[in-house]
Image (tube, grey):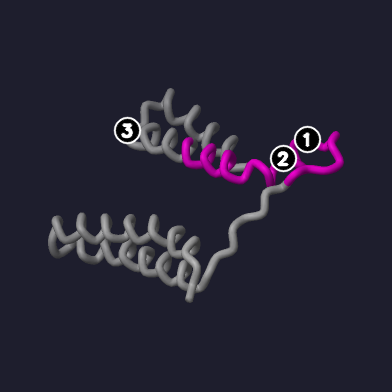
Amino acid sequence: MMLPLIGNILMVTIPLKWIGTPNVLPFLLLLDLILLWQYWDFFRPQIDERKSSYDVKSGSMRTRNGYLVWLASLAFQFSANQVSFWNWPATLTTVILGMILSALSSRVDRTPSL
């Protein structure tokens, strides 16, 4: 439902020559398309109703350690806003650490626990 909504907002803001909104909305459209592509197996039965059965891929099981690493990365991302009032290089470091931790959360889920 976000695709038509963001698309319509984009079509209105371009002729009105708004300054920032037409620059942000294509990025949001791209993020929506990435989500649709990522979860295509789950949306397919709603789109193509002719076929009675689908091979839905099961997602990988998430572990508690993976969630904790992901929550730590989220805490880094949220704290970057407060750090930005203090020091710009520290803000950049906080954001990069948060992004690295969020990428590592999927690796933590893949490693077998002892």
Mark 2 or mark 3, earlier in chain: 3
Q: Nearer the viewer, mark 2 or mark 3?
A: 2
- For residue 7, which numbered disc appears in the image? none
Mark 3 or mark 1, earlier in chain: 3
**Badge 1 element:** loop
Asked if residue 10 lies left or right of residue 92, the reply is right
> Where does label 1 land, which residue?
48
Front-most of 8 and 37?
A: 37
Residue 14 vertical placement versus 63 (above, below): above
> Where does label 3 land, which residue?
19
Residue 18 found in image quarter: top left
Separation of disc 2 and disc 1 at Cα?
Answer: 6 Å
Separation of disc 2 and disc 3 at Cα?
Answer: 37 Å
> Where does label 2 land, which residue?
44
Front-most of 91 and 51?
A: 51
Q: Amino acid at mark 2?
A: Arg
Residue 14 vertical placement versus 37 (above, below): above
Q: Amino acid at mark 1?
A: Asp
Separation of disc 3 and disc 1 at Cα?
Answer: 39 Å
* Farthest residue, direction bottom: 114
Label 2–label 1 contact, CB within 8 A = yes
Label 2–label 3 contact, CB within 8 A = no
Q: Which residues are magenta?
A: 30-55
Residue 103 found in image quarter: bottom left
Q: Amino acid at mark 3?
A: Ile
Asked if residue 24 lies left or right of residue 88, the reply is right
How far across and how far down the image is residue 97, in percent?
27, 60
How far across and how far down the image is residue 93, in percent?
20, 58
* On-image quarter of the N terminus: top right
